[in-house]
Amino acid sequence: MSTNKGPGFFSAIGSKARDVLTKDYNADHKLTISSSSNPGVDLSSTLVKSRGLSSGNVAALFKYKDKTVVDVKVDTESSVLTTFTISDILPSAKAIASIRVPDYNSGKLEVQYLHDHVAFTTAVGFNRSPTIDFSATIGTPGIAFGAETSYSTAIGKLTKYNAGVCLKLPNSNASVILADKGDSMKVLYLHQLEKLNGGAVVGEISRRFSTNENTLTVGCLYVVDTQTVVKAKLSNHGNLGAVLQHEITDKSFLTISGAFETKALENSPKFGFSLLLKP
């Protein structure tokens, strides 16, 4: 199922701008080693240290004829997550089923449909009183309107409803998202610049109506060379963050991030790193 046609899923609205402002900004220490032992089989092992606590997982991904994927992940909490993905169950449709052992109630079945002018997803949990999630977008690759909602059968109410619109131009895109049951609104804008070697500048304005709180965040992405990317962001609350990502070898990445609160000088900076190795 192609992801390049149509308006895209609701989760893609504003995603490029969000990635510049949020992706890889963390204080965790993470090491991932990934390899492909046989055609159609990928193996990986991950160790994470976060807030003084260590955890890890081992994962195996099996592909069959590019239409069926089985992903099995075992973590240090003795939890086994298995995800089945079947593409083209119907034209332009994909099914994703996941189940976690021993927590069977966390299982979920999701169906995705992506076509030239419409896209939708629907998901339902594997339990007696499941939550039903639904999202839909209409439009074209250039402009899209969408909404998402969650309905809890346990309480018989909508627990979430969001809406958004996205406009994409050759060198820029803008998005407006109304979230938190109408209590918050975000406006995101991304503009690509040739002076940044294909990088971009990003701005986000968010407002929470119940508290009259406004947040302005600006950021940029700079492509140093074909192997190195630098990102930085700053909000009006004094939160400063930066990310450096370098491709060590083919598909192996070292990511270093740092965060600092300029309005709370007594707080020490927080640093994190992520190392992805593919021998």
Image: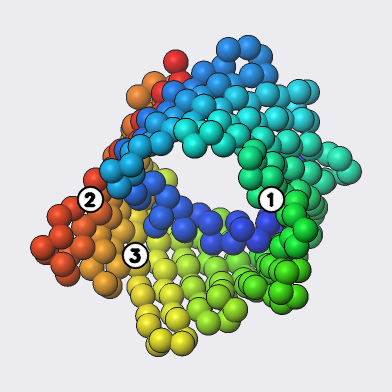
Residue 218 is labelled as 3
> Which residue corresponds to the image point at 63% horizontal and 26% vertical from the top-left?
61
Q: Spatial distance from mark 3 to mark 2, Cα to Cα? A: 20 Å
Camera-near label (2 vs 1) is: 1
Quadrant where the N terminus is found in the figure: top right
> Which residue corresponds to the image point at 36% horizontal and 75% vertical from the top-left?
215
Q: Position of residue 211 (x, y in %)?
A: 41, 86
Task: First in sequence, mark 3 or 2: give its number.
Answer: 3
Task: First in sequence, mark 2 or 1: give its number.
Answer: 1
Q: Spatial distance from mark 1 to mark 3, Cα to Cα? A: 40 Å
The residue nearer to you, when weighing 220 against 40, is 40
Circle 2: element type? strand
Q: Position of residue 220 (x, y in %)?
A: 34, 55
- Position above or below: 262 against 178: above
Amino acid type shown at disc 3:
Val
> Which residue bears the numbered disc 1?
105
Label 1 environment density (alpha carbons within 10 Å; few <14, some 14–19, many ≥20) = some
Camera-near label (1 vs 3) is: 1
> Which residue corresponds to the image point at 82% horizontal and 46% vertical from the top-left?
93
> Which residue bears the numbered disc 2?
270
> Which residue corresponds to the image point at 50% horizontal and 79% vertical from the top-left?
184
Give the quarter of the image for residue 122. Answer: bottom right
The residue nearer to you, when weighing 20 against 46, is 46
**Residue occupying the far top of the picture:** 38
Amino acid type shown at disc 1:
Asn
Give the quarter of the image for residue 82. Answer: top right
**Residue occupying the far right of the picture:** 90
Circle 3: element type? strand
